[in-house]
Image: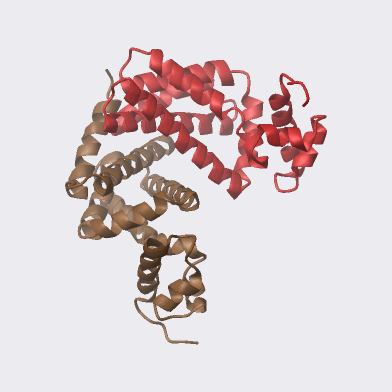
Chain colours: A red, B brown
Amino acid sequence: MARWQPGTRDRLAAAALELFRERGFDQTTVTDIATRAGLDKRTFYRLFGDKREALFSGGQMLQDMVVEALTESDAAPFDAVVAGFDRVAREIFADRLEFARARQSIIAASPELTERELHKMASLAAAVAAALRAKGVGDTAATLAAESGCTVFRVAFARWVSEPGAEPLADLIAEVTAELRAVTSAA
Amino acid sequence: MARWQPGTRDRLAAAALELFRERGFDQTTVTDIATRAGLDKRTFYRLFGDKREALFSGGQMLQDMVVEALTESDAAPFDAVVAGFDRVAREIFADRLEFARARQSIIAASPELTERELHKMASLAAAVAAALRAKGVGDTAATLAAESGCTVFRVAFARWVSEPGAEPLADLIAEVTAELRAVTSAA
């Protein structure tokens, strides 16, 4: 068996993104991706379940970071979740606007990828809710704080990738959080 | 061409639900469903795109009712959306707990159906946000009110179908709305 290559996963994910941009998702094969990365198909399948997964490579890191941040936080549940996404915005996305835009336009062009994205967001919300329950937050409150925090992140992220000259993602998260509080506050 | 049969759609949806319960979703064919309803396969495909759609037959009615209710409402955006789901709870689901439970357990058992359900919920939230924007609500506020209202409905619905002796859905919607406001209010 080949020695473990650090960065193999990143190389494959970067090659997939490049090819999906150049040729489109449907026109790219796993062999194309592996070849572009200077690797073989078997290596791809050791790391990813299918072609779609190469675009969702960073999802687990994002989830782990949100969960770790909220677990360490002493804030109220919703604030703790927002703090988790704030950390993600600063530590993962600060310099990655171009990457995020490229990825988003590939996903938006494919119903299959859009479905996978929805599925990943639902899994993220479930993981965040589970982490809150592990801290002793009640069942319904944990789900609501998790879902609301994920809504803030999705809306802020969508604005960040779609608005020309957008503010930094962390600033958008703070703004959208304030707007969510205003929208849901009792009249 | 056969004369239009009122109730054909409902008969097929009911037959599909029965068969999915008896045999499982994967083990049921479109021909089985049509036969159980006393109709043929062609009639099924005139009304539904595929086998999955027979389980999501009521989704358009639900969406139309929420949109109509919130469009008529003078309340603030989030309250208008909640009022829409309150109407749905009273007019569609009041006597349908057993149906909702059966449908939910079929969906939960199939990853394919769970994906379709996520997709339908995302479409519903998008339609609700569009209806709010048509009333003049700002872009971000419309999305946040729509997403938060859908979160309330999903959480209330999940409790309604899973808790033995659950309160009526409309009462759960009111409770979950209050809890969402509490969770997202500033500390």
Give the x, y percent position of residue B148: 34, 38
Quarter location, residue B158: top left
Q: Residue B104, position in %: x, y? A: 35, 52
Q: Residue furthest front?
A: A1
Quadrant containing the C terminus of chain B is top left
Give the residue at x 42% y 63%: B23
Identify whether B181 is placed above or below B129: above
- Residue A167 versus residue B4: which sits nearer the camera? B4
Left or right: residue A63 compared with residue A17: left
Residue displayed at 24% across by 38% down: B176
| The one of A40 and A98 positioned closer to us in this rendering | A40
Above or below A131: residue A25: below
**Left or right position of B55 against A101:** left
**Residue shown at the point (24%, 59%) measured from the top left:** B96
Judged left or right of residue A161, residue B39 is left
Q: Residue at x 64, y 41 (%)?
A: A52
User: How far from the left and from the top, in percent, is residue A43?
Assistant: 74, 32
- The mark total stands at 0
Residue A170 visible at all: no
